[in-house]
Image (cartoon, rainbow, N blue to C red):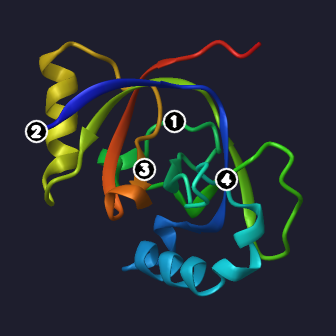
Amino acid sequence: MEVKRLTKKAFFVLGKLGSSRDGENFVQKLWEEANGAFEQIASLVKRDPDGSVSAVWGAMSDFSLSFLPWEESFSQGLYLAGTEVTEDCPKVEGWILWKIPGFEYLCVKAEGEHSFQEGISLLKERNLPLVGAVQELYLPKENGQCYLLFPIRKLEEP
């Protein structure tokens, strides 16, 4: 399992919002909706110097939108299927903008269906707290490789 620490200041994600209360396969449906309407926001997406999309996020929060871990054994919460944008991103009809707080993360490369549980176990082994909702980071430059970001320390906001 590939693991590293990552510190990321607060950032913004523009996406399609759903909830575990929306029923089975709600995450897949959100991604289909977001990908199908990507052209609506393509000009707003944060990009690398070569013009490629910087980061795609499966952003998560508890229902209070406090970015706490999902409830009921990590099975209940909010999910935003989207992409990173700049702070000055305008409102776009049909899309939701979240400001994800800054955290220090334990970053785990997702390499199978058990990666989430392996990350939770790793936190326990290292005696690290889970202080926020786990985030999914997809890197287009790595063929969409997914990393699970487990928040272990919230950064102070200026």
Please, what secondary structure does the residue beneath circle 2 have?
A: loop
Please state which amino acid type lies under the numbered disc 3: Leu
Residue 118 occupies which quadrant of the picture?
top left
Side (left or right) of 129 relative to 84: left
Residue at image point 52% right, 24% down: 103
**Label 3 or label 2, whichever comes before in sequence order:** 2
Residue at image point 76% right, 68% down: 43
Task: Identify residue for label 1.
Answer: 68
Crowd tier of the residue under label 2, counting other residues whose Cα lies within 10 Å: few below 14, some 14–19, many 20 or above? few
Task: Identify residue for label 2.
Answer: 1
Side (left or right) of 19 relative to 151: right
Q: CA distance from mark 1 to mark 4?
A: 25 Å
On screen, residue 122 above or below 48: above
Mark 1 or 4, which is nearer the eye? 4
Q: CA distance from mark 2 to mark 4?
A: 29 Å
Please state which amino acid type lies under the numbered disc 4: Lys
**Label 1 or label 4, whichever comes before in sequence order:** 4
Could you tell me which quadrant the C terminus lies in?
Answer: top right
Task: Identify residue for label 3.
Answer: 137
Task: Identify residue for label 4.
Answer: 46
Please state which amino acid type lies under the numbered disc 1: Leu
Residue 11 drawn at (x, y percent): 66, 38
Please state which amino acid type lies under the numbered disc 2: Met
Could you tell me which quadrant the N terminus lies in?
Answer: top left
On screen, residue 141 above or below 118: below
Residue at image point 21% right, 13% down: 127
Residue at image point 40% right, 57% down: 141
Side (left or right) of 116 relative to 132: left
Crowd tier of the residue under label 3, counting other residues whose Cα lies within 10 Å: few below 14, some 14–19, many 20 or above? many
Crowd tier of the residue under label 1, counting other residues whose Cα lies within 10 Å: few below 14, some 14–19, many 20 or above? some
**Label 3 or label 1, whichever comes before in sequence order:** 1
Please, what secondary structure does the residue beneath circle 4 have?
A: loop
